[in-house]
């Protein structure tokens, strides 16, 4: 009982000392720490006491405490490091006190600290435990901030052991901290040769080393390339080199290596598939296509099916991204999807294929009946979950809305909204129903639903709801009717259905209505979007210029600037009537966004695009995705 009381009292005293130290009353803190240390020379009390003494530069007293504690410590080497640290602090204090005459003294003190540290390293026991080494390494890093002492420590322990690959993982991490690329890679390769499962961990370490520095990335690639040439039969080395090519987005080179890798190490084509997939995701469709086609021709049965799906999905992404209008190509891809679908079991795994095929049927080939028929067929499947069936209903409702079957669409949206009230699928259904109401001129009802969606968990849905609600709120006509907004909503619905010429006529009617001036910026911006879809970029640029020059206070001005800049960026060498190239126009517009509209969500992206066009070596290679497919993921 007495022991417990004493411990409780010491605990209270320790907290009191810590409080004094935090409040800057260091004398009181040191006095209490000293009293506790006389009774309790545990490592924790020792550290608290020593740190307080060193903070107050009581070096002689600190040295006595270190020597006193060393006799009882279970790891005397750690206490030796404290002695070296004490010398470093004395050196710094001396240099600070005597800036003009202290150079010689500093050098002498430095030699003492280094001698202590080197002595610790030299005296490492022959069979020191890894735990002791780890403690000492952490102490060196914490006290000196210099990884080289920890490196020497592990190197000496390795030499003592006679095992040239011992402590490779620890040394690799230390070399990374010390900026030694070649040494780091040498150690990490040794780790990987012993345990392939550690590749992800090693890749993470290398990524930390590279950071955002392209020079370091090139250095790592060169090291791995040389190592791969030296060890062509080393699976771990070849795998890591391939990974470095992926990071650099050298996909063509990576595909050649992955084909050699798969032949040499018989990985069933996994590296080829991964290279092709990464190529496709990064927009290198040429390399992606080569990779998938190679596997379809030379791969095993399981890989052939997998590659066919991936290849068609890549083609689908191209269609969505580039808004392909080549009917022959669209029909070819549709037929290949249909063949694939007919070979698949009708379950969850087939749904992504169905959804892509439906979009090609409905939105690109205008084969609405085929799209509807396929989706109605899927709804009869018993092997899919309720949430998956709800997503199919949404796809069907979207197709029905696209084809102008408004009431059929609203019925399906309503069913999904009712069944998934607190789910993103339900929120999307509610948004589409509100958008449908907006299209047909039921603005009050649409706004009431949109206002509810402002609190949706999905940021995209909440933002879309907020924008449409704001449009309705701010654009009643001067006579409190919604004449202008009715025209604009009708044009948007026609545009959604890709009835572009009809939409343009309605927008021109709106622009020729002088009392609807407040909607002119929206009308010109919508016309620009339509002209882009029609591949009439010159007309689009004229409309965008009307927005950003004529409506500088519009919420659409930054969007118009950005869209125009993107158009010019795609024709960098085309010179206009004023002798200005597309690249120069794009740079000027991007610059205007981040200079004049710094609060815009597009400002950061505009700055990145500007820097890339200017040729900055440190500009990011990847930009935030713009995303073509607004559907929620299944």
Image: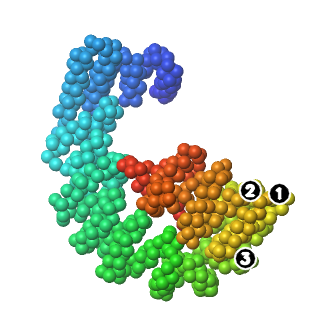
Q: Which mark is residue 478?
A: 1
Q: Which residue is mark 2?
A: 518
Position of residue 268 relative to residue 548, above or below, is below
Q: Residue at x 16, y 48 (%)?
A: 163
Give the left or right position of residue 419, taking residue 603 as reference: right
Q: Position of residue 52 (x, y in %)?
A: 41, 21
The reply to whether callout 3 and callout 1 are in contact (CB within 8 Å) is no
Outermost residue toward the left? 162
Position of residue 396 relative to residue 194, above or below, is below
Outermost residue toward the right? 479
Q: Residue at x 38, y 27 (%)?
A: 47
In terms of secondary structure, where does tag 3 sit? helix
The reply to whether callout 3 and callout 2 are in contact (CB within 8 Å) is no
Distance from Cα at disc 3 to Cα at disc 2:
28 Å
**Label 2: how many residues lie within 10 Å, few (<14), some (14-19) or many (20+)?**
some
Q: Which residue is mark 3?
A: 406
Of label 2 and label 1, which has the lower sequence position? Answer: 1
Q: Position of residue 609 (x, y in %)?
A: 47, 53
Position of residue 89 relative to residue 634, above or below, is above
**Label 1: how many residues lie within 10 Å, few (<14), some (14-19) or many (20+)?**
few
Image quadrant assignment for residue 278 = bottom left
Q: Where does the C terminus fall, quadrant-wise?
A: bottom right
In terms of secondary structure, where does tag 1 sit? loop
Q: In front here: 105 or 576? A: 576
């Amino acid at each position: 009982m007495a022991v417990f009381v004493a411990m409780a009292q010491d605990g209270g005293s320790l907290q009191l000392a810590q409080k004094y130290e935090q409040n800057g009353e260091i004398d009181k803190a040191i006095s209490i720490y000293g009293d506790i240390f006389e009774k309790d020379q545990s490592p924790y009390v020792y550290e608290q006491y020593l740190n307080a003494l060193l903070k107050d530069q009581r070096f002689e007293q600190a040295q006595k405490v270190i020597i006193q504690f060393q006799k009882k410590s279970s790891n005397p080497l750690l206490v030796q490091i404290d002695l070296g640290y004490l010398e470093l602090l004395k050196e710094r204090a001396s240099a600070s006190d005597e800036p003009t005459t202290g150079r010689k003294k500093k050098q002498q003190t430095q030699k003492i600290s280094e001698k202590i540290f080197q002595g610790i390293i030299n005296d490492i026991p022959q069979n020191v435990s890894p735990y002791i080494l780890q403690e000492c390494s952490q102490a060196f890093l914490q006290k000196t901030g210099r990884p080289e002492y920890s490196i020497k420590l592990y190197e000496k322990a390795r030499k003592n052991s006679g095992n040239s690959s011992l402590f490779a993982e620890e040394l690799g991490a230390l070399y990374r901290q010390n900026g030694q690329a070649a040494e780091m890679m040498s150690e990490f390769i040794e780790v990987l040769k012993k345990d392939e499962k550690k590749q992800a961990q090693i890749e993470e370490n290398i990524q930390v080393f590279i950071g955002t520095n392209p020079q370091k990335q090139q250095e790592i690639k060169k090291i791995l390339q040389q190592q791969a040439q030296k060890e062509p039969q080393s699976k771990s080395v070849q795998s890591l080199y391939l990974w470095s090519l992926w990071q650099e987005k050298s996909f063509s080179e990576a595909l050649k290596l992955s084909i050699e890798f798969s032949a040499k190490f018989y990985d069933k084509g996994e590296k080829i598939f991964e290279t092709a997939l990464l190529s496709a995701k990064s927009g290198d469709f040429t390399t992606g296509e080569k990779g998938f086609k190679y596997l379809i021709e030379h791969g095993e049965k399981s890989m052939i099916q997998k590659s066919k799906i991936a290849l068609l999905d890549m083609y689908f992404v191209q269609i969505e991204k580039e808004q392909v209008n080549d009917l022959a190509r669209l029909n070819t891809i549709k037929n290949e999807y249909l063949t694939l679908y007919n070979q698949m079991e009708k379950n969850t795994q087939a749904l992504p294929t169905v959804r892509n095929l439906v979009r090609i049927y409905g939105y690109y080939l205008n084969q609405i009946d085929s799209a509807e028929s396929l989706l109605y067929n899927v709804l009869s499947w018993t092997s899919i979950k309720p949430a998956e069936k709800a997503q199919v209903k949404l796809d069907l409702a979207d197709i029905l809305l696209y084809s102008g079957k408004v009431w059929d669409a609203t019925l399906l949206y309503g069913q999904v909204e009712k069944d998934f009230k607190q789910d993103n699928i339900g929120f999307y259904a509610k948004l589409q129903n509100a958008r449908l109401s907006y299209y047909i001129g039921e603005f009050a009802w649409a706004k009431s639903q949109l206002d509810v969606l402002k609190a949706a968990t999905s940021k995209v849905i909440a933002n879309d709801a907020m924008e449409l609600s704001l449009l309705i709120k701010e654009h009643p006509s001067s006579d409190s009717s919604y004449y202008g907004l009715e025209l604009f909503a009708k044009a948007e619905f026609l545009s959604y259905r890709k009835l572009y010429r009809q939409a343009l006529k309605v927008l021109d009617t709106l622009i020729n209505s002088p009392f609807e001036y407040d909607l002119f910026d929206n009308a010109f911006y919508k016309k620009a979007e339509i002209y882009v879809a029609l591949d009439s970029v010159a007309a689009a640029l004229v409309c965008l210029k009307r927005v950003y020059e004529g409506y500088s206070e519009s919420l659409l001005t930054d969007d118009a600037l950005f869209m125009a800049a993107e158009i010019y960026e795609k024709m960098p060498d085309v010179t206009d009537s004023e002798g200005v190239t597309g690249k120069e126009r794009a740079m000027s517009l991007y610059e205007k966004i981040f200079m004049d509209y710094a609060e815009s969500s597009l400002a950061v992206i505009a700055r990145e695009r500007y820097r890339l066009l200017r040729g900055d070596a440190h500009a990011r290679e990847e930009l935030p995705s713009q995303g073509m497919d607004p559907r929620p993921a299944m």
